[in-house]
Amino acid sequence: MITGLGHVAVRTSDIEKSVKFYTETLGLKEAFRLYGPEGELSIVYIYIAPDQFIELFVNGRKEHKITDDEIGFCHISLQIDSVEKCYEEILSKGIEPDTGILLGRAKCRMFWVHDPDGNPIELMELPPESMQAQATARFASENGKEK
C-alpha cells in the first residue's frame, strides 16, 4: 500500500533564498517549478532521492514557531553518507551548524542546521549499528529483499 515518503512541504518567506539554501548549501537539486494561473511561481520541488522531494511553497507570511512541546511538525531529517564529510562541507559554505556531531539514542550519527525560515534540519548518517539500519535490514529480509 504505502511505498515511501513522497515529499515534505515547507512554506517559505523567500522562495529563491530557500531554493538556494537547499540546492547550494545542502547540495540537493531543483527538480521543477509549478506556476499559478497568472504565471506566478507557486511551488518549487527539490529532489532528494528517487521519488522523494521537498516541496517549497511561496508566500509564507506568518512565522511558525517550532517548540519542544508543540504538537505537529518538528523537523526534516535528511539521510547522509558521512556525517564528518557533510559537516565539513556545510562549514566550508560558511554555515555554522546548530550542533556539533551527535550520537542519537538509536545509534545514528547526526548534526543539525536550519533553513532560511528557521525550520530545523537533521542531517543523519545511519551506520550498520543504528536501529534504523537494523530495522531496514530486518524488514528487507522479511520481504525477501537484500538491503
Image (cartoon, rainbow, N blue to C red):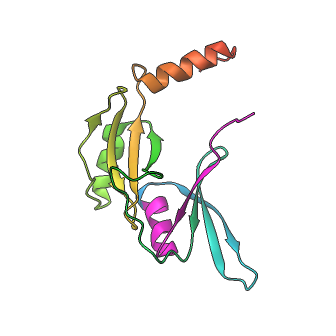
Work out which residue is located at the far bottom of the displayed protein and give it: 38
Counting from the top left corner in percent of width and height, residue 86 is at: 36, 45
| Residue at position x 29%, y 47% in the image | 88
The magenta stretch is 1-24
Image position of 22 (left or right of 105): right
Residue 11 magenta = yes
Residue 72 magenta = no
| Residue at position x 63%, y 69% in the image | 43
Counting from the top left corner in percent of width and height, residue 61 is at: 48, 78
Q: Quadrant of residue 131?
A: top left
Counting from the top left corner in percent of width and height, residue 5 is at: 62, 43
Counting from the top left corner in percent of width and height, residue 26 is at: 43, 55
Image height check: is 54 above or below 4?
A: below
The front one of 81 and 109 is: 109
Q: Quadrant of the C terminus?
A: top right
Report the number of discs.
0
Image position of 31 (left or right of 87): right
The front one of 102 and 32 is: 102
| Residue at position x 37%, y 58% in the image | 66
Image height check: is 112 above or below 15?
A: above
| Residue at position x 44%, y 36% in the image | 81
Q: Quadrant of the N terminus?
A: top right
The front one of 86 and 134 is: 134
Image height check: is 82 above or below 73?
A: above
